[in-house]
Image: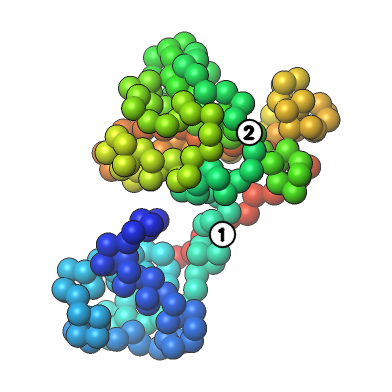
Amino acid sequence: MSLESVPPKYAQLVQALQRRIESGTYPPGSMLPSEHQLIQEFSVSRPTVVAALRVLREQGWIESQQGKGRFVRGRPAMATVESNRPGQAYLTSPETDAPGELVEAAAVALPNRVAVLLEAEPKGKAFLRRRLVVREGEPSELVSLWLPLELSEGTDLTSGEPLPQGIRQHLRSRKGVRFDHIVEQITARMPTAAEAKQLGMPKNVPLLAVFGAVRDASGRPLVVVEVLLPADRHELEDAYPVR
């Protein structure tokens, strides 16, 4: 669960407890303070404490033992890898954080894969915002954001300037949509001539194509983000708890 840039009370409590775990105030194996103790110390309600503890448990920071209480597991591997997911990073980070140039911003026909992920009509149109991201002075990745035409209306996605906020925050403030989860797919293919030229890569080097279908809490697709990574410059890492 990602936290908002202006966190609600439960998210602030999550962050405070995470800092204590990382600093060793609550070392691995130690018992976490009780709900009552957290309520008293942080001056919050019980629902706030319950929500924060649920997030920590789901992310792997703590575990519950029946009849004993909640115990610290430590900083989970997931916490260090989560920010490396290219699709999620593009959705949550301001475009101004990643130097680059806008390649395209227009209504275009949907490719078959993106149409399926958006649950749209084949050959239908959607709005595309595509940026070439530059790192250390060289082209690094080609990032495409696909969304229904009506969702792009009234936003700054048509602007040639980089957005000073993440796509998630921008769409929430302008359109009132809430991202809930991402269904991610990773494939490999050879680049087109245009992609190879834009990314400054040999035509015989494959691309890693990461597709992230963003959905709301009901499962309705909102946005598809596509990140194209030259395979000779990138590797993808993941981590997950063993249960």
Query: What element does badge 2 sit on?
Result: strand
Neighbours of disc 2 within 10 Å: few (<14), some (14-19), many (20+) = some
Label 1 or label 2, whichever comes before in sequence order? 1
Residue 41, image x and y in percent? 24, 85
Q: Position of residue 57 (x, y in %)?
A: 35, 69
Residue at x 83% of width, y 30% of height: 202
- Residue 89 in sight from this viewpoint: yes
Q: Front-most of 79 and 94?
A: 94
Separation of residues labelled 1 and 2 (CA atoms): 27 Å
Q: Position of residue 59 (x, y in %)?
A: 41, 64
Disc 2 marks a residue whose amino acid type is Glu
Q: Is residue 87 visible?
A: no
Indicate the position of residue 96 as horizontal and vertical percent values. 55, 45
Quarter containing the N terminus: bottom left
**Element assignment for label 1:** helix
Residue type, mark 1 in image: Val
* Residue 175 vertical position relative to residue 115 in the rendered view, above or below: below
Residue at x 73% of width, y 28% of height = 198
The quadrant of the image that shows the C terminus is bottom left
Which numbered disc, 1 or 2, marks the residue closer to the eye? 2
Report which residue position mark 2 lands on.
Answer: 101
Q: Which mark is residue 81?
A: 1
Q: Residue at x 72, y 21 (%)?
A: 194
Which mark, by number, is residue 182? none
